[in-house]
Image (cartoon, rainbow, N blue to C red):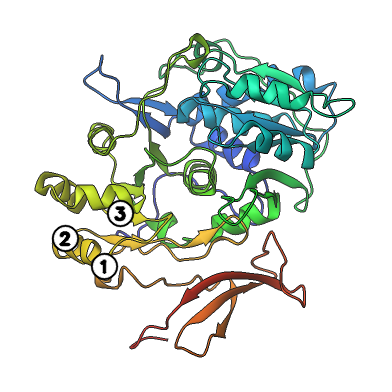
Amino acid sequence: MNNEKPQISLSSLNETITVSQGFDFHYKHNAEEPVYVFSDKDSDEPTTVNYREFVRACDRVAHFVRPGRSGAIDGQVVGIVLVTDALQYQAILVGVMRAGLVPFPISHRLPPEVIVHLLRITSSHHLITTPTTLPAGLFDGIRQELNQGENGYELQIQEMPALNYIYPKLGNEKASDSFEPYPPPSQIPSPNDIAVFLHSSGSTGLPKAIPQTHKRLCQWAIVGIPELRLNDPRLRYSAIGLPLFHIICFFVCILKPAFHGLSISIFPPVDTASGAQPPIPTPKAILEHAKCTQATGLVTIPVFLQIWGHLKEDVDFLASLEHVIVTGGILSTKTGNALVEAGVNLDSMYGSTEIGPACRFRVQRGREKDWEWSEMTPCIDFEWVSQGDGTYECHVLNSETHEVAVLNRSDKRGYATSDLFVQTPNKQ
């Protein structure tokens, strides 16, 4: 890792309190720098969407959702149930934020009654969706569920705008191109205002809608400093295959570009408004697009690493990357060790919707053999509760540097994760 100051300008996290402000900084200082990169089969070179084009795309979404910043009240929740590509999905999320509203990305894999339940408990009366690409019966099921009860549930449903509305000059937008900026807010949001809702997995019951404040998102962004900010040239992480509604994707695809200036490799966009389905993230397709987009890092889930670990060509490519992060599950020790022995700079990321990301990013080589062990960030106040058998339950306590989204301890001081850890035998 090169510790010289990177060429890209970076904002101070003491001054930037919202995702919109983060992207505004790049729009002003790094407009030509890449934020998303994809590879199209019709072109030999990858297509780059820079900060200028992305911010303008988000403003177009804001115009679409809340024209003139009128009508809706600041802070109203907008449900987002989409089957589309990452480039449009992120523009929808950030565009809703720029409109002064609160996005709530919801998995399209949930049944209609659960989706409507999540809308109800967050008082969301506005839904952006893609009726033609949702799983069969889901859109009709949502409509039917809305009519349940004596008076039903009032919901404004908007179909996601077309690709050529959000990105009219896809990959080629110039500063001189016609563009109408979205009206700025009359006042900057409070750090304690809700920025976004993210839902839990629902593995132990109904998914829970968890509010995340602007302050909390900034605290999440701090995880990884100084490792990510000092890396020059800038890392480009492939996020292909990550579920778009999930905290992992939000952290990688929105917070890292907004606050750290990282670029992200994604699948090419498709016009879902006309019924086109986004590409399927097969193991082969993920690595092919990571190569074509010149990714230098990869964030993925265990199942893909298990598959890639059987093919020498795939392992060689993984070893050529500067950083490979596994998250969202447990990778077998055998597979992880084999990848490390083959030269893969493997790292594990731990976190949850309730506590956010909890580990440091270990980009530098030399510690790969410790890939199974999480190096917890010093930004978080942890309490390790002994279970009497050599394992410890992870509790995250509220502090000035890291605030949890859910309080479930009897003393209301933090969150008990139910996740068990063991202490490293040779490190504290």
**Quarter occupied by the C terminus:** bottom left
Viewer-proximal residue among 14 and 258: 258
Label 2: which residue?
343
Place of residue 72 in the rendered image (x, y in percent of width and height, measured from the top left): 83, 26
State which tag comes first along the sequence, 2 or 1.
1
Label 3: which residue?
324
Foreground disc of the pair 3, 1: 1
Place of residue 305 in the rendered image (x, y in percent of width and height, measured from the top left): 26, 51
Q: Is residue 211 above or below residue 294?
A: below
State which tag comes first along the sequence, 3 or 1.
3
Q: Is residue 72 left or right of residue 24?
A: right
Of the residues shown, which amino acid type is indicated by label 1?
Thr
Of the residues shown, which amino acid type is indicated by label 2?
Gly
Farthest-out residue, left: 312
Query: Answer yes or no: do the residues labelled 3 and 1 have beta carbons within 8 Å?
Result: no
Q: Is residue 404 left or right of residue 9?
A: right
Q: Secondary structure at mark 3?
A: strand
Instruction: Judge whether residue 399 can be spotted in this image.
Output: no
- Marks 2 and 1, Cα distance to the nearest angstrom? 15 Å
Q: Residue at x 49, y 31 (%)?
A: 51
Viewer-proximal residue among 3 and 39: 39
The disc placed on residue 13 is: none
Q: Residue at x 83, y 21 (%)?
A: 70
The local crowd at label 1, few if under 14, some if 14 to 19, many if 20 or more residues have their Cα within 10 Å, is few
In which image quadrant can residue 49 be found?
A: top left
Label 1: which residue?
333
Q: Secondary structure at mark 1?
A: helix
Place of residue 247 in the rendered image (x, y in percent of width and height, measured from the top left): 54, 48
In which image quadrant can residue 345 be found?
A: bottom left
